[in-house]
Structures are given as C-alpha cells and as structure tokens.
Image (cartoon, rainbow, N blue to C red):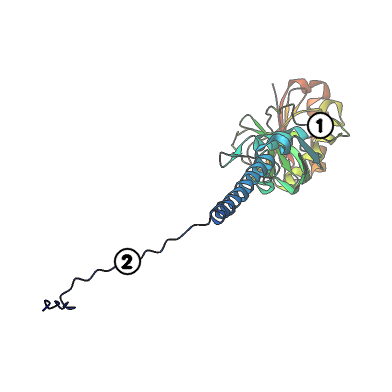
C-alpha cells in the first residue's frame, strides 16, 4: 500500500508577497519642453530688467538730459548773473546723494523757486522745463526803490521799505548761457538807485522792513531838488538807524544838512536857502560843519 500523502496545512504554510513595481518611463520630449518654457520666462525677465536699467541710465544718469541752458526773462532790476548763480549753485548739488539736480527729469522746480526766494523776494516766479536740456525762468519783480548799506553789506529795498535782495557775487561756469539781450547795462541800472547808509550798522535780513513808504518818498524827492543847485550837490545820504526820524545829507562841499522826515520838503528847503543867503554865504559852504533843520522855524548851523 502506498504511503499516505501528507496533506498540506494551508494555515501553517508560509506566505510570500510578491510586490509588483510599476515601471514609469519619462518621455524625453516632454522633459525638454519644460526646460524650454522655463528658459523663455527667464529670458523675458532678463530682457525687461536690462531694459529698465538702460532707461534709468539714459534718462537719469546719462549726460544727454543734463541741463546745459538756462533762459531768464522778466528781470529789470535783479541781474541775470545773480539769478544764474543761484540756479547753477542749486543744479550743482545732488538729490539723495545719487540723483543729480542737473538732470532735467530729477530737477525740482519748487525747490529752485524756494532757493531763489531765499536770496531775492519776487512778486511771482515761473519755472519751465524744455526738453532735452533747457529750463526757463520768468520772474515778476517787486518795485525796487533804493539801496540800503549796513554792516559792510548792500541790500535792495522796495517802495514799501522791505529788504528784497542782498547783493553778492559767485562764479558762474561757462557751460551755462543766458538767452537774453538787456536793453541797458545792468551795472548802470544799479547805479541809478540812491544809496542810504545806516550809521548804526544794524544787521538786517531778507524780508525785514527798514523804512516807511513815506521816508522813501521823502528821500527820492529831496535828493533831485538839492542836486538842482550847484552848491548843494549830494555826496552821501545817511540815516541814524532803521525807521529814522531824520535824514542826514552830506554835501560834496563837505558839510552836512539834517532834515526832518516828518515835515514838508518845501518848507525845509525854504529855510535852508534863507540861512545860506543871510548867514553863511554860498562861497563859505566848504567851511560848513552842519545845518540842522529838524526843529521847525529854529535853524541851527555850525562852521568848522
């Protein structure tokens, strides 16, 4: 009898798990296509970045749009050289240490307007940009009346007695040109103003008032009247301080005359001529120390 076949116990048999791995194949053409898309995006960004850098350089940092021409219009009293100096000094500085004020796109009109008003007071100022490298400054001045001398400085005073300008001079580079043909020589225009010397030498600033309009009117009227007479030619005009009560006229002959600024010119001139004719004599004015007309009908004089 054949031996019995041993039955297999399915519960005790070892189990083997066969793991199946799925093999994935990458498509070469798809991999290359992804690289192509990424490179194109980068290329566009690089081109844009380079374009921005080039635009910044061309419009901001290159010399093509640097201001090299300044046009000045409307000035009759303030010299073109002074306005040019102020403008050039402003353009020579940098904005935020990087951007040049001289570049027409960086150039700030309000900032220049402020700088000009720190040196001269104007009724109005208009500043225009004209591409590629020109700015135009058009001004409207206050009514200048005379010059004020004090503390070894010279100022311009308007008809209201306000300091509107301090005279100064700086060097202007030849690179800048003035598009203007003045009718009269500017030095001659400056010489037409009467010079008033403040004997107290008190310091003043732009915008300060030093005279009343009535004082200015008195001074402007009396000087021509004195100059009409050969023996009363005016050499210097002095006041004791700001808002003075009296005026001192120094004659070319050497003597001085004290006028009351609150009294009529005609009455004082009448007393002046009377005292010269009756007491002093025209030929003796070179020996005159002073004539004092400040006390109404009482006139005093002193000879040297």
**Residue 156, x across and y down, in percent:** 71, 38
Q: Quadrant of residue 150?
A: top right
- Label 2 or label 1, whichever comes before in sequence order: 2
Mark number for residue 29? none
Local crowd at mark 2 within 10 Å, few (<14), some, or many (≥20)? few
Image height check: is 39 above or below 146? below
Residue at the spot 73% in from the left edge and 35% down from the top edge: 84
Q: Quadrant of residue 17?
A: bottom left
Between circles 2 and 1, the one closer to the viewer is 2
Residue at the spot 22% in from the left edge and 71% down from the top edge: 15
**Residue 2, x across and y down, in percent:** 12, 77
Left or right placement of residue 208 versus residue 136 in this view: left
Image height check: is 33 above or below 190? below
**Residue 188, x across and y down, in percent:** 82, 29
Classify the position of the N terminus by image quarter. Answer: bottom left
**Residue 247, x across and y down, in percent:** 71, 37
Mark number for residue 186? 1
Judged from the image, the secondary structure of the residue bearing numbered disc 1 is helix
Q: Nearer the viewer, residue 166 or 27?
A: 27
Left or right placement of residue 228 versus residue 213 in this view: right
Left or right placement of residue 228 versus residue 285 in this view: right
Q: Nearer the viewer, residue 142 or 203?
A: 142
For residue 79, say whether it is visible: no
Q: Nearer the viewer, residue 8 or 41?
A: 8
Local crowd at mark 1 within 10 Å, few (<14), some, or many (≥20)? some
Mark number for residue 19? 2
């Amino acid at each position: 009898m054949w031996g019995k076949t041993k039955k297999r116990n399915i519960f005790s048999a070892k189990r083997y798990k066969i793991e199946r791995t799925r093999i994935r194949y990458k498509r070469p053409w798809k991999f290359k296509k992804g690289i192509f898309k990424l490179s194109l995006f980068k290329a566009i960004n690089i081109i844009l970045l380079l374009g921005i850098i080039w635009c910044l350089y061309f419009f901001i940092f290159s010399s093509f749009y640097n201001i090299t021409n300044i046009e000045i219009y409307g000035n009759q009293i303030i010299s073109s050289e002074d306005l040019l100096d102020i403008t050039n000094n402003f353009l020579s500085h940098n904005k935020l240490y990087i951007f040049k004020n001289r570049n027409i796109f960086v150039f700030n009109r309000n900032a220049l307007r402020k700088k000009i008003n720190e040196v001269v007071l104007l009724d109005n100022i208009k500043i225009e940009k004209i591409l590629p490298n020109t700015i135009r400054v058009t001004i409207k001045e206050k009514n200048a009346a005379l010059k004020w001398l004090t503390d070894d400085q010279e100022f311009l005073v308007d008809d209201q007695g306000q300091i509107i300008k301090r005279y100064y001079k700086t060097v202007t580079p030849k690179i800048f040109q003035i598009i203007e043909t003045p009718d009269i020589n500017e030095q001659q225009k400056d010489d037409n103003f009467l010079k008033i010397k403040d004997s107290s030498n008190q310091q003043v600033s732009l915008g300060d008032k030093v005279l009343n309009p009535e004082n200015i009117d008195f001074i402007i009227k009396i000087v021509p009247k004195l100059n009409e007479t050969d023996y009363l030619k005016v050499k210097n005009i002095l006041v004791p301080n700001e808002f003075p009560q009296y005026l001192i006229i120094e004659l070319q002959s050497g003597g001085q005359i004290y006028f009351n600024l609150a009294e009529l010119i005609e009455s004082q001139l009448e007393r002046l001529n009377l005292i010269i004719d009756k007491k002093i004599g025209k030929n003796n004015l070179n020996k005159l120390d002073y004539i004092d007309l400040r006390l109404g009908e009482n006139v005093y004089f002193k000879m040297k």
